[in-house]
């Protein structure tokens, strides 16, 4: 199955999750650099090279990653950290509570 960034943003809209796209530099940064270079605390939906994931920034460069293989692990070279960030959106209200 192929998923596109616009489809994920559309799903956020349908679910009522407020979000704001982030302006990214023209030169793509690695996920590690993205997470450690002043990312404000909060939740983010991120597209990296060939993959989507959720990030939770705790501030001070500490960021945990959630995807289909990792739950709450620190961003590192072993956890997709060397892949490049292509799209990102901040989830303004955080994650919705499970129904």
Image (cartoon, helix red, strand yellow):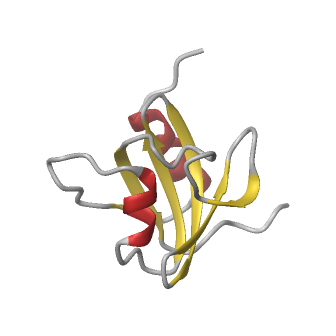
Q: Residue furthest front?
A: 77
Q: Does the rendering let one see residue 44?
A: yes
Q: Return the x and y of residue 27 as percentages of the image width and height.
A: 17, 47
State whether residue 90 is above or below residue 46.
Answer: below
Going by the image, does 98 lie left or right of 92? Answer: right
Residue 19 visible? The answer is no
Q: Residue furthest bottom?
A: 60
* 57 to the left or right of 99: left
Location of the C terminus by quadrant is bottom right
Could you tell me residue 57's position as x and y percent? 55, 73
| On-image quarter of the N terminus | top right
* Left or right: residue 9 compared with residue 14: left
Q: Which residue extends farthest top?
A: 1
Query: Which percent across, then down, holds residue 92?
Result: 48, 73
Compared with 26, 49 (above or below) is above
List x then y, in percent, for residue 89: 41, 58
Q: Which residue: 50% across, 40% down?
A: 8
Query: In the image, what residue occupies the spot 52% across and 33% down?
Result: 51
Residue lying at 23% horizontally and 60% vertically, measured from the top left: 23
Judged left or right of residue 83, residue 67 is right
* Total numbered labels placed on residues in the image: 0
Residue for point 41% across, 36% down: 5
- Res. 64 image quadrant: bottom right
Task: Please tell me which residue lies in front, 54 or 49.
Answer: 49
Q: Which residue is at the far right? A: 99
């Amino acid at each position: 199955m192929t998923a596109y960034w616009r489809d994920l943003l559309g799903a956020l809209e349908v679910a009522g999750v407020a979000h704001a796209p982030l302006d990214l530099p023209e030169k793509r940064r690695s996920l590690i650099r993205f997470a450690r270079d002043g990312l404000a605390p909060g939740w983010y939906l991120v597209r990296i090279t060939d993959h989507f994931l959720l990030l939770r920034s705790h501030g001070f460069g500490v960021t945990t990653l959630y995807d289909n293989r990792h739950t709450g692990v620190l961003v590192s070279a072993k956890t997709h950290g060397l892949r490049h960030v292509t799209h990102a959106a901040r989830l303004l209200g955080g994650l919705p509570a499970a129904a």
